[in-house]
């Protein structure tokens, strides 16, 4: 059954659809560690996926600490950003998975990353989302709990 | 290379993209040999350079990010506009731009008197006309004043009226711009406006005329003589002469209005020769422009000058959005405000007090049912009558505070755009007096902890309580929703007694501000400064008090309705055939003041799953407070307020503010600095944030929240789930 799209989910989905890249924050040994990742997401907004190679720092970090935060935003580097830009912080738990449905989801959005995904070193990371934090108009913060 | 300043007769002035529509039109008239006062145009590029280099562009974006235009109430738009205006006033024009302007102005005699006028790329376009939405300033002398008023005209691109019509004007930070016309003042003996086609009769033209400058006419302060001409022949068809003639003359850096001497007042302002000259010129202009025009003119020593011409459009005057038209009508002139003040103070408030007293003496119990129904109607009529006066007179008078704020900021250029509020606040508000009485009772309670067992103390306390109820019964709670008035009052007093009762904070700055304020006016304007301050203080005081007086009529009506209901219920209880008694008196039939105010009817649809963490509104009372939320959805919720709660309300009015001494902070859905919640918060020095849409729905009772009254934020730490 198709889930009803509430205004909050509608707004989140709109941003997720418009953007391709998210800033991923993982927990390093001494510092938080940020990287840019290409993401795809499930229709019900419960899952965001990205792909990484296993030798990367982020992958190592994830092996130790599964909890992550992602930032997706619509900034344009103009003053108008303070009025118009939306920032979405996503909190969730990760697990690696190479299930065909996730591969399909990722390639559907990024067909040009097929070679990258096919590399034996690459795995898909699934983020099961706990919470979305939606920031608009510079300081207005709304939250949506998924769990 | 971009030119920042051009003479009006320079060919580049004909380009509206460069110089705005008004300057382009004047340039066109000059090229057609129509007499226009000599002047310069500061181009759109100058405005763009100023807002970019001064950082104002970024500041405007931040200001506009606070809330969607569509969600803003009039007061919020005015507040945003005032803050923007203050930044324009405070920022220096870049040196190279300033030097360019100075160089051009210095070519004229230092005694030259100027008019500084707006010429935006929004107004006066052929498909729309929003006359008066931007500012113009008459009789400005000296380079410092010219530069100051240029900034005021620039700021008026973001006037409250312009922002209210943001959508229609396509007002936005990237495309909107403001050129400024710096034009020699021609001090006409007669001035006026021509509508080359009378909106009520297309075969006629209407000429409106006043003595002196036409500023008084344009602002609506002076009633003109009207002359109706046949459009084809120029023959005078009819005329109507103003009964109470006044005229406007230059005065300091501005103008003033005086009465026309009686011998002159009876004459028609324009003679045949004047009418002929005006007709000839407007016919020529209309021929050039090809559409009917709205033309401002002046006659100086028999020479007719055209000050402005713009197309008459269908969009002018008519506005389908009546609420917005009404909002815009609230902008009143100094003259009009003085008149309103006299009416309110000398006529309406005494009459309201007298009438309410009279009605309260009419006994309900002895009336039979028929007579009681008539009494309800009588009270309803009284309430409706005063409600209408409230909307027509009391609310527009609140503009007195706005006018004062603008003049204060112009003259004193404070860092805080709301510094003026410290000068006009007053502890004479009826609601404050009422609250002081409540606090006195709480103090009594604190000093006498054995009140329930000590007979003497109990009696003394009861006496005080009865005195309060006698004086403020209609304020203590809504009659029909809170039948046990005494109980509710005792609850409030007990809660008040739990906290140390301090005197209302004194504003030490007030005397310093007062001194600075009067120093900003020259000797012969001291009386004006005094009058203006007095007007603003009254405006502030009445803004609060008038609700309290109106609330009295509301309560008197409800008392009668309650009596009627009670009889019906009693009768039903005695009648065995009467099952499931339902009151057939529709509450809406007797719609009343406070019940309407607290009725929240926002759709819940879009609130289903968002959990608010941080909500942005307007800072309306400085300070930070953390505490538990008490949400007021109906009047009886006020009786549940506890010490140190944070009050969350939709729209507080003075009849509800008796709980304010109890609370630590205020959050209100309705936005603005001049609303009751903000006024009372300021009086008590409480942090206050206004303009949070759906505040009473997004925040729940006992949510732990922080009110940041500096930036205008409400942070919800933990939800009561």
Image (tube, rainbow, N blue to C red):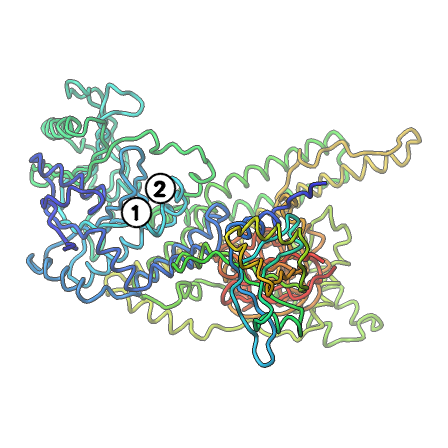
The residue at the point 31 percent across, 65 percent down is B90
Residue B130 position in % (x across, y down)? 32, 39
Screen quadrant of the N terminus of chain B: bottom left
Label 1 element class: loop
Query: To which residue does mark 2 refer?
Result: B169
- Dot 2, how many residues are within 10 Å of its Cα: few (below 14), some (14-19), or many (20+)? some
Who is closer to the viewer here, B368 or B161? Answer: B161
Who is closer to the viewer here, B488 or B523? Answer: B488
Residue B5 in the image: above or below residue B347: below
The residue at the point 15 percent across, 29 percent down is B288
Chain at tag 1: B
Q: In this view, does B142 lie to the left or right of A136?
A: left
Residue A29 position in % (x across, y down)? 60, 80
Who is closer to the viewer here, B320 or A42? Answer: A42
Label 2 element class: helix
Q: Specify which label sits upstream in the sequence, 2 or 1.
A: 1
Residue A81 in the image: above or below residue B354: below
Q: Residue B542 carries which label?
A: none
Screen quadrant of the C terminus of chain B: bottom right
Residue B638 position in % (x across, y down)? 69, 56
Query: To which residue does mark 1 refer?
Result: B134
Q: How far apart are marks 2 and 1 (CA)?
A: 12 Å
- Dot 1, how many residues are within 10 Å of its Cα: few (below 14), some (14-19), or many (20+)? many
Give the residue at the far bottom of this rendering: A30
Residue B325 in the image: above or below residue B50: above
Query: Is residue B718 something one can see in this rendering?
Result: yes
Mark nearer the viewer, 2 or 1: 2
Q: In this view, does B19 lie to the left or right of B277?
A: right
Residue B491 position in % (x across, y down)? 75, 63
């Amino acid at each position: 059954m198709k889930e009803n799209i509430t205004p909050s989910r509608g707004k989140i989905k709109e941003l997720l659809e418009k953007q391709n890249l998210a800033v991923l924050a993982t927990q390093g040994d001494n510092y938080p560690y940020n990287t840019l990742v290409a993401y795809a997401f499930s229709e019900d907004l419960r899952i965001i996926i990205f792909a990484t190679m296993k030798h990367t720092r982020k992958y190592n970090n994830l092996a130790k600490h599964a909890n992550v935060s992602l930032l997706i935003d619509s900034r344009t580097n103009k003053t108008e950003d303070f009025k118009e830009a939306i920032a979405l912080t996503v909190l969730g738990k990760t697990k690696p998975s190479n299930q065909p449905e996730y591969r399909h989801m990722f390639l559907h959005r990024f067909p040009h990353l097929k070679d990258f995904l096919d590399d034996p070193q690459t795995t898909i990371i699934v983020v099961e989302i706990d919470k979305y934090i939606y920031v608009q108009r510079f300081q207005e913060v709304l939250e949506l709990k998924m769990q | 290379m971009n030119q920042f300043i051009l003479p009006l007769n320079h060919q580049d002035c004909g380009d509206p993209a460069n110089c705005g529509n008004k300057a382009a039109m004047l340039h066109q008239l000059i090229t057609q040999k129509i007499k226009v006062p000599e002047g310069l145009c500061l181009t759109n590029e100058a405005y763009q350079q100023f807002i970019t280099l001064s950082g104002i562009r970024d500041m405007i974006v931040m200001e506009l990010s606070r809330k969607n235009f569509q969600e803003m109430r009039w007061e919020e738009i005015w507040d945003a506009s005032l803050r923007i205006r203050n930044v324009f006033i405070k920022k220096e024009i870049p040196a190279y731009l300033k030097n360019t302007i100075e160089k051009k102005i210095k070519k004229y005699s230092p005694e030259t008197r100027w008019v500084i006028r707006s010429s935006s790329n929004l107004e006066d376009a052929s498909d729309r006309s929003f006359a008066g939405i931007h500012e113009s300033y008459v009789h400005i002398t000296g380079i410092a004043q010219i530069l100051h008023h240029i900034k005021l005209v620039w700021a008026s691109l973001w006037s409250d009226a312009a922002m209210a019509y943001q959508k229609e004007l396509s007002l936005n930070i990237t495309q909107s711009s403001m050129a400024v016309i710096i034009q020699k003042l021609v001090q006409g003996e007669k001035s006026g406006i021509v509508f080359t086609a009378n909106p009520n009769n297309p075969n006629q033209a209407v000429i409106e005329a006043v003595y002196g400058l036409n500023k008084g006419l344009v602002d609506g302060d002076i009633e003109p003589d009207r002359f109706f001409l046949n459009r084809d022949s120029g023959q005078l068809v009819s005329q109507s002469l103003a009964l109470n003639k006044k005229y406007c003359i230059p005065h300091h850096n501005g103008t003033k209005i005086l009465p026309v001497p009686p011998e002159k007042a009876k004459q028609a302002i324009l003679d045949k020769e004047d009418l002929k000259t005006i007709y000839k010129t407007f016919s020529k202009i209309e021929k050039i422009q090809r559409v009917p025009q709205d033309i401002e003119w002046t006659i100086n020593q028999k020479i007719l000058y055209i000050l402005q011409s713009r197309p008459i459009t269908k969009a002018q005057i008519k506005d389908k959005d009546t609420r917005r038209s009404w909002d815009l009508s609230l902008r009143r002139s100094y003259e009009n405000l003085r008149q309103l003040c006299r009416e309110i103070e000398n006529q309406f408030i005494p009459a309201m007090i007298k009438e309410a007293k009279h009605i309260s003496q009419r006994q309900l119990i002895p009336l039979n049912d028929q007579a009681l129904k008539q009494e309800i109607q009588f009270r309803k009529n009284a309430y409706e009558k005063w409600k209408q006066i409230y909307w027509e007179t009391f609310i527009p008078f609140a503009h007195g505070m706005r006018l004062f704020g603008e003049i204060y900021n112009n003259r004193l250029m404070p860092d805080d755009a709301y510094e003026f509020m410290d000068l006009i606040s007053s502890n004479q508000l009826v609601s404050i007096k009422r609250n002081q009485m409540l606090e006195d009772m709480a103090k009594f309670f604190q000093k006498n902890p054995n009140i329930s067992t000590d007979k003497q103390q109990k009696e003394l306390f009861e006496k005080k309580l009865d005195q309060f109820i006698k004086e403020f019964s209609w304020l203590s709670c809504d009659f029909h929703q809170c039948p046990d008035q005494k109980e509710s009052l005792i609850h409030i007093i007990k809660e008040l007694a739990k906290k140390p009762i301090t005197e209302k904070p004194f504003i030490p700055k007030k005397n310093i501000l007062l001194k600075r304020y009067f120093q900003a006016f020259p000797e012969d304007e001291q009386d004006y400064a005094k009058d203006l301050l007095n007007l603003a203080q009254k405006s502030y005081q009445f803004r609060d008090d008038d609700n309290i007086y109106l609330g009295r009529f509301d309560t008197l009506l409800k008392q009668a309705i309650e009596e009627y209901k009670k009889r019906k219920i009693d009768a039903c209880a005695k009648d065995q055939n009467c099952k499931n008694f339902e009151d057939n008196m529709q509450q809406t039939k007797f719609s009343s003041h406070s019940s309407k105010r607290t009725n929240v009817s926002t759709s819940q649809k879009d609130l289903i799953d968002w959990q608010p963490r941080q909500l942005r509104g307007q800072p309306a009372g400085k300070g930070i407070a953390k505490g538990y939320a008490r949400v007021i959805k109906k009047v009886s919720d006020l009786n549940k307020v506890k010490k140190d709660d944070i009050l969350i309300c939709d729209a507080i009015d003075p009849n509800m503010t008796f709980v304010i001494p109890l609370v630590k902070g205020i959050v209100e859905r309705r936005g603005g600095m001049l609303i009751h919640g903000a006024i009372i918060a300021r009086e008590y020095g409480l942090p206050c944030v206004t303009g949070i849409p759906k505040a009473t729905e997004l925040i729940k009772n006992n949510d732990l929240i922080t009110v940041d009254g500096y930036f205008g934020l409400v942070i919800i730490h933990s939800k009561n789930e």
